Image (tube, helix red, strand yellow):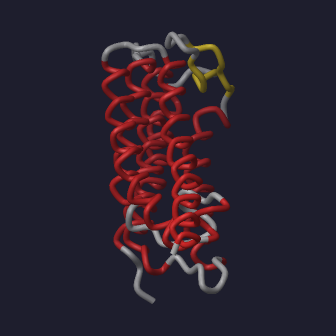
């Protein structure tokens, strides 16, 4: 069985995240930061031994889940046609979590980490990666814009994902720039919501349009 390069990279990120925690574990305080508020101030911590390992273990769980999804996908909705795109989307998700893990460790070691600026940049980069591959995602039950209208009509799925790819990339770039400019995290979260909501609305409108075209034909 051939193992995809992206799978090896994803596994490598999980192992590296665990190794980083192990390397600095003894230097970390009893409580490590796990959450920052909207202005970038730590407002939640978790004690050892679980605190430092929360993100690496989460990464391992996500990796295992994403690895399993193609195996349990129902017939006629297989994920094999976009295997490479799926691998890159996985890499983006785990890469984002890895970067967040680094921020947690640096903060635990006493570094002043400007999370309110860096987090939006990370989210924006993740959205740009996802958006670049969204147009290659074929109909399935796990990845993409899965609305009743895209699942019901292949043409709606195709057009929606082509549109969504561009919208998500644009949204990701806007979020990253907003973060660099010091925009409130509440605004950033609104941007993330819109990147998900706009393609969903588009899918409904496209479905109505195709129905009207068929009815008039």
Which quadrant: the N terminus?
bottom left
Placement of 45 over or under 7, stated as above or below? above
Closer to the camera in the image, 135 or 50? 135
Question: Furthest-bottom residue in view?
Answer: 1
Closer to the camera in the image, 18 or 80? 80
Quarter-of-image position of residue 126: top left
Placement of 136 over or under 120, stated as above or below? below
Residue at the (67%, 81%) spot, across then down: 74
Residue at the (63%, 58%) spot, across then down: 147
Tell me residue 112's x, y (percent). Answer: 40, 13
Tell me residue 119's x, y (percent). Answer: 44, 27
Q: Is residue 57 found left or right of 130 in the rendered image?
A: right
Placement of 78 over or under 102, stated as above or below? below
Placement of 141 over or under 180, stated as above or below? below
Q: Is residue 108 found left or right of 121 in the rendered image?
A: right
Q: Is residue 95 found left or right of 51 in the rendered image?
A: left
Residue at the (48%, 36%) spot, across then down: 101
Closer to the camera in the image, 52 or 62? 62
- Tag count: 0
Tell me residue 179's x, y (percent). Answer: 37, 21
Tell me residue 39's x, y (percent). Answer: 51, 10
């Amino acid at each position: 069985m051939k193992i995809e390069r992206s799978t090896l990279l994803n596994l490598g990120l999980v192992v590296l995240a665990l190794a980083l925690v192990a390397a600095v574990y003894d230097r970390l305080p009893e409580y490590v930061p796990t959450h920052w508020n909207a202005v970038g101030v730590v407002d939640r911590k978790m004690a050892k031994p679980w605190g430092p390992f929360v993100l690496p273990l989460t990464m391992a769980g996500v990796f295992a889940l994403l690895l399993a999804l193609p195996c349990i996908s129902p017939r006629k909705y297989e994920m094999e046609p976009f295997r490479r795109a799926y691998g890159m989307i996985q890499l983006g998700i785990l890469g984002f979590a890895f970067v967040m893990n680094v921020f947690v460790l640096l903060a635990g070691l006493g570094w002043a980490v400007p999370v309110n600026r860096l987090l939006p940049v990370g989210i924006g980069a993740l959205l740009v990666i996802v958006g670049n591959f969204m147009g290659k995602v074929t109909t399935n039950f796990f990845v993409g814009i899965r609305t009743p209208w895209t699942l019901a009509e292949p043409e709606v799925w195709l057009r929606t994902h082509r549109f969504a790819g561009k919208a998500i990339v644009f949204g990701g770039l806007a979020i990253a720039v907003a973060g660099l400019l010091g925009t409130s995290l509440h605004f950033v979260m609104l941007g993330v919501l819109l990147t998900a909501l706009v393609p969903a609305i588009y899918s409904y409108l496209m479905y109505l349009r195709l129905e009207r075209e068929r009815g008039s034909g």
